[in-house]
Image (cartoon, grey):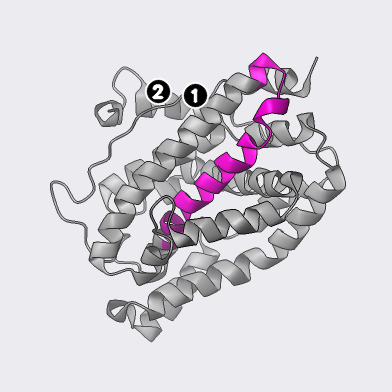
């Protein structure tokens, strides 16, 4: 049995859903759209800004191996992965347009049209590294997003954070689909002969840089936004963010990826997926009217 077939026994085919979120409707989004929380608002804005170019890069990394995937099961899972990531990028671009209007300059840095100079530069950098290194970065990034997704969907303390309802619907949908396709890039990496040592070393370097790089990105976003220049408030809320359910302990949950022989399906999210499948897309699912 091939790697792709074995993994599919635990992971269903990712389903592509054509979503249409309604940001700023019927009420305009407030500038600090997460509980009037400055650091958390900027964290979500930075992540949303980075998602479209990141997901387009993930798609390119997997497509580089499309001619080498012979397992029909894995081929179907890859098609679902590509479709889901494409829609994620599309919907985050719609949110990013709102964020740019609200005054988040950092988001504008990540926003460029297909074929623009910045995209060509990103692709040029991708092509400088070996294909398996590019794919390994995708696999480790998918581990980050799926680990965060388990927190977002599984922690009542996170679900109860007051914020813009449409933004939270987007985040819940995105988290759900990240869990649906969490092992696809990983399985392509293994099925095409990706090195276990390279996978672990790349994660070790990324792991060490995560908190500093993300913290600097959020700080830069705050400094670029005059309406967020509230030093005492930002310091107090930042401490709460680092000690709260989104960040505290997250890196410990990322760490198993560096264990030899690790597979994303070692972390069982089956029950969580089933619960949110009913909540979001069941007979009375809250996102049924967002499917375009």
Q: Is residue 43 left or right of residue 209?
A: left
Q: Is residue 59 magenta?
A: yes
Verify CB contact (< 8 Å) between mark 2 and mark 1: yes
Q: Residue at x 46, y 61 (%)?
A: 117
Element under disc 2 = helix
Which residue position is annotated with label 1? 274
Boundaries of the magenta span: 46-74
Nearest the camera: 83 or 21?
A: 83
Nearest the camera: 208 or 266?
A: 208
Q: Residue at x 39, y 59 (%)?
A: 111
In the depicted structure, whether residue 159 falls above or below residue 37: above
Element under disc 1 = helix
* Alpha-carbon span between mark 2 and mark 1: 6 Å
Q: Is residue 260 magenta?
A: no
Which residue position is annotated with label 2? 278
Horizontal and vertical percent position of residue 93: 35, 50
């Amino acid at each position: 049995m091939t790697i792709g077939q074995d993994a599919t026994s635990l992971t269903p085919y990712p389903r592509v859903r054509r979503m249409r979120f309604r940001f700023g409707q019927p009420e305009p989004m407030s500038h600090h759209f997460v509980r009037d929380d400055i650091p958390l608002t900027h964290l979500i804005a930075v992540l949303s800004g980075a998602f479209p170019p990141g997901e387009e890069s993930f798609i390119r990394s997997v497509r580089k191996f499309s001619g080498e995937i012979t397992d029909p099961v894995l081929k179907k899972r890859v098609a679902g992965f590509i479709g889901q990531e494409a829609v994620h990028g599309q919907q985050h671009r719609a949110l990013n347009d709102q964020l740019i209007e609200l005054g988040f300059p950092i988001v504008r840095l990540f926003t460029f049209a297909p074929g623009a100079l910045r995209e060509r530069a990103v692709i040029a950098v991708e092509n400088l590294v070996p294909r398996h290194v590019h794919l390994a970065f995708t696999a480790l990034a998918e581990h980050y997003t799926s680990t965060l997704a388990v927190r977002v969907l599984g922690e009542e303390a996170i679900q109860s954070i007051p914020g813009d309802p449409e933004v939270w619907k987007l985040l819940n949908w995105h988290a759900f689909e990240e869990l649906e396709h969490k092992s696809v890039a990983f399985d392509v990496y293994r099925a095409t002969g990706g090195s276990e040592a390279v996978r672990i070393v790349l994660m070790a370097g990324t792991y060490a840089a995560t908190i500093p790089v993300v913290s600097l990105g959020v700080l830069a976003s705050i400094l670029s936004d005059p309406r967020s220049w509230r030093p005492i408030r930002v310091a107090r809320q930042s401490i709460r963010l680092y000690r709260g359910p989104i960040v505290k302990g997250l890196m410990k949950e990322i760490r198993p990826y560096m264990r030899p022989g690790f597979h994303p399906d070692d972390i069982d999210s089956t029950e969580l997926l089933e619960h949110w499948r009913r909540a979001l897309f069941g007979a009375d699912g809250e996102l049924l009217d967002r499917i375009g």
